[in-house]
Amino acid sequence: MTEPTAPKGTTVVAEWVVKSPVLKGCSARAAAGFAAAAVALFALAPLALSDFRLGLLAKYLCTAMVAVGICLAWGRGGLLTLGQGVFFGLGGYAMAMHLKIADAGPGNLPDFMQLYGTATELPWWWRPFENPLFALAATVLLPMAVAAILGSFIFRRRVKGAYFAILSQALTAAFAIWLIGQQATTGGTNGLTDIQGFFGYDLNDPVNQRMVYFVIAAALLLLIALARQLIHSRYGELLVAVRDSEERVRFLGYNPANVKLVAYVVAAGMAGLAGALFVPAVGIISPAMIGIVPSIEFVIGAAVGGRASLVGAVLGAVGVAWAKTALSEEFPAAWTYFQGLLFIVALAFLPGGLASLVGIVRRRRAARAGGEPSPALPLGEAA
Amino acid sequence: MTVILGQTFTGISIGAVLLLIALGLSLTFGQMNVINMAHGEFIMAGAYTTYVLQKSISGAGLSLLVALPVAFLVAGALGALLEWLLIRRLYLRPLDTLLVTWGVSLMLQQLARDIFGAPNVQTRAPDLLTGNITIIGGDDPLTFANSRLFILGLAIAAVVALSLTLRMTSLGRRIRGVVQNRDLAEVSGISTERVDRTAFFIGSGLAGVAGVALTLVGPIGPTMGTNIIIDAFLVIVVGGIGQLKGTVIVAFVLGVLQSVLEYSTTVSVAKVLVLVAIVAFLQWRPQGLYTLRTRSLV
């Protein structure tokens, strides 16, 4: 994997790494922030919000889980992946297939297959999803496997930057079109709808909806912790180094393709888990939630909050998703303009996202206090 | 036999549309490494220009002829404006450009929705272009649609015009110079800024022309550009940047491949197979079919 194979240069990188400002993230503060987030998610939100609003929050948190992966792959690794919808969809469909089979009961076909399908029994590739353990594992492992195969092809041949972004976008377009085309077995444009139960729990019961919310919140915190560990590990530093100067890392004896591959695969797994938990929270998964447009919307949340900052990306994703609901319900046209403006302002004028404002303010204050201003860093500054 | 010929011709006409769109991209993406997601909305602008002109000029043939240069100017002006307002600030950040121009494309789509309404509109094709040409008569006839032939002709004309411009004119020399070595061009006294803007104007203008062509084969709507633009980007990725011949060859190859695969499988499976073919191709030539040889590492 990414374990350095080169004895030479390791010390150089290590020295370089220790001096990097990213490591200055104080861990006591991080723990406090983590605890505060847990209190907000597990105590405040359920108390303050109605069942309906809590359900919406659950949906936003799923977007935030995808954003954690994007923060890793794009913010840290420079891989602009416009195809997270594919992995989100793979996870979502894997979960939804199992829940549909479970809803139908043993021996029966899922409702939509009876409607348009000519099939009298489950298609062979649905069969394994009857097993709950297989389905659960598949929600994370299937996206990771697809990402690993695709990524190893793409990165090994040094297809990068814009080319990678376009390929990933083409992938998500092709996947959505393929799903729509296979109406008899995937539900086509409608997707898999009307999911009633979640491993034996009735999803129409508000108490069970709350439980789903708690599962999602816990999963999000888990992913954040995982990503934070990765970012602050040696691997995380290597990832940033690959982003900023791939050739230099190569000359030091590392293989940048492997470094990127790990970030891409982990991000895919996170998107898969998000998709899987999105299904019980919303009760539906369809091609409209995984195509080009939703895939790029995953990115905008991370971009607005701060792509290189975990906290920024997560808050940005939740904020943008919330703004979408709040604005688009009443003024759909205004929302589209606003969303366009968000892209422009966030990326053209504030590439570090809102999280970089903290750093900017801190530097200004330090400069006013007469201290030596710390140098502005392009992206990696906000941790 | 006629089926194969017919599918090939359909493929060539898909390729011609792709080529018209990708030509503009080969300038903006190939020359400046700018991924302009709003290119699709420039196509839309060209199509709506045709629609508006047809409302004010009665003859369908005349309005189409007038629409070609006007759409070129309208889309080109939009492109130059976009370059001046946003893109020139982002030349060193191609990935950010992609997302910024996506934002622009969202706003342009909504603008079109507000002006022309969300439902698609249609233009009337001139009588000359509505019929078919029969190549082989008899029981198993092979016919080509006139409109498709017109688009093919238009694409060829655009390629010839663009390659002559690049090869013969001093503007073309400057553009090629900037593509091959931006710094050297700059120190040789070329205003790369002006070259960039001109190239962007021409590239976006070609999108407008493609929009006029698309009105002949489909409806005009706010989202008409979004789907086709990805295929056009793939043409550039596979063809390689900086040279026209790669774009031309790949546009037709992908068009024929798509059409033949669609015939033997289904539309959705064909899309997936084409993408698999592209990823496989990039294993062999990661920089695309034709590339400019440089000594740089990236």
Image (cartoon, helix red, strand yellow):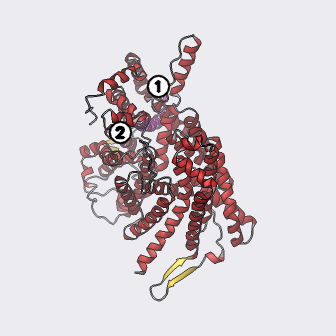
Rendered residue at 36%/62% (across/down): A184
Q: Image quadrant of residue B277?
A: bottom left
Near mark 1 (Cα within 10 A), the count class, few <14, some 14-19 or many ≥20, is some
Q: Nearer the viewer, residue A228 or A164?
A: A164
Q: Which residues are magenta?
A: A46-73
Residue A22 shows in this picture: yes
Q: Residues within 10 Å of mark 2 (few under 14, many from 20)?
A: many
- Mark 1 falls within which chain? A
Q: Residue at x 56, y 62 (%)?
A: B20
For the stretch drawn in magenta, the main secondary structure is helix
Measure the C-alpha gap from mark 2 to mark 1.
20 Å
The vertical placement of A254 against B278, above or below, is above
Where's residue B122, x and y in %? 63, 65
Circle 2 chain: A
Question: Is label 1 in a helix, a strand or a loop?
Answer: loop
Q: Where residue B223 sits in the image (x, y, percent)?
A: 57, 55
Residue A87 in picture, x, y percent from top left: 37, 45
Residue B274, magenta (yes or no):
no
Q: Is residue A65 magenta?
A: yes
Q: Look at mark 2 in the image and give the residue it sits on.
A: A260
Residue for badge 1:
A381
**Mark 2 secondary-structure assignment:** helix
Please state which amino acid type lies under the numbered disc 1: Glu
Q: Is residue B84 left or right of residue B249?
A: right
Mark carried by residue B90:
none
- Outermost residue toward the bottom in this view: B138
Question: In this view of the protein, which residue sits in the foreground, B197 or A142?
Answer: B197
